[in-house]
């Protein structure tokens, strides 16, 4: 198998990214007595507003996906904590073990909920940046 290997990934799709700025080099003509006037000049072509808008919309979608994963993790861990609480009552011989697992699952649920909250704010920031890039939103400075 000398050919390229294709890795199948569930969540991380690596694609070739476009460069943020394109640099174009052009040779200038010699202008006479000054040696510093000849050579190469650099012209930077910045991204257009629509490219920036699409970049921020993609970032918003990415954070929305991660927010949903955090929410699902919180629900799953909370459900497991409730299950362990039930098992602690049902199985008094191993109640201590079930109570410990319940506390761990509750802590995981809280952490996952915090992660979802964090991603919600990241999504909101990306949405605001997308609106600014498209020109839909204007900052009004009062001071």
Image (spheres, rainbow, N blue to C red):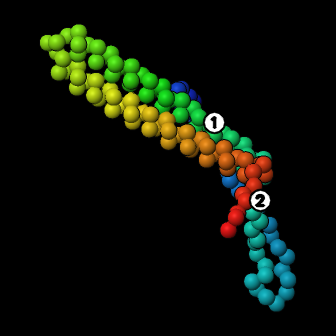
Which residue is found at the position 70% from the left and 46% from the top?
A: 130
Dividing the picture into quarters, in which one does residue 42 lie? bottom right
Residue 88 visible in the current orientation: yes
Q: Is residue 100 above or below residue 30?
A: above
Instruction: Indicate which disc residue 47 carries.
Output: none
Which residue is found at the position 55% from the left and 43% from the top?
A: 121
- The residue that disc 2 covers is 45
Residue sitting nearer the eye, 37 or 43: 43
Side of 110 where 3 appears, left or right: right
Q: CA distance from mark 1 to mark 2?
A: 27 Å
Q: Is residue 122 above or below residue 104?
A: below
Which residue is found at the position 36% from the left and 31% from the top?
A: 108
Dividing the picture into quarters, in which one does residue 138 lie? bottom right
Which residue is found at the position 39% from the left and 30% from the top?
A: 109
Give neighbour class at mark 1: few <14, some 14-19, many 20+ (Cα, 10 Å). some
Element under disc 1: helix
Residue sitting nearer the eye, 110 or 44: 110
Please state the horizontal and vertical placement of residue 43, each as a whole percent of the image: 77, 65
């Amino acid at each position: 198998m000398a050919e390229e290997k294709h890795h199948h990934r569930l969540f991380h799709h690596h694609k070739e990214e476009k460069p943020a700025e394109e640099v174009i080099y052009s040779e200038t003509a010699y202008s006479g007595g000054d040696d510093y006037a000849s050579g190469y000049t650099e012209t930077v072509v910045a991204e257009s507003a629509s490219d920036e808008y699409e970049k921020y919309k993609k970032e918003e979608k990415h954070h929305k996906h991660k927010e949903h994963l955090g929410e699902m993790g919180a629900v799953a861990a909370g459900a497991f904590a409730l299950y362990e609480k039930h098992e602690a009552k049902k199985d008094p011989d191993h109640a201590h073990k079930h109570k410990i697992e319940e506390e761990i699952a509750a802590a995981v649920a809280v952490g996952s909920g915090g992660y979802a909250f964090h991603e919600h704010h990241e999504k909101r920031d990306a949405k605001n940046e997308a609106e600014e890039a498209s020109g839909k939103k204007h900052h009004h400075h009062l001071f």
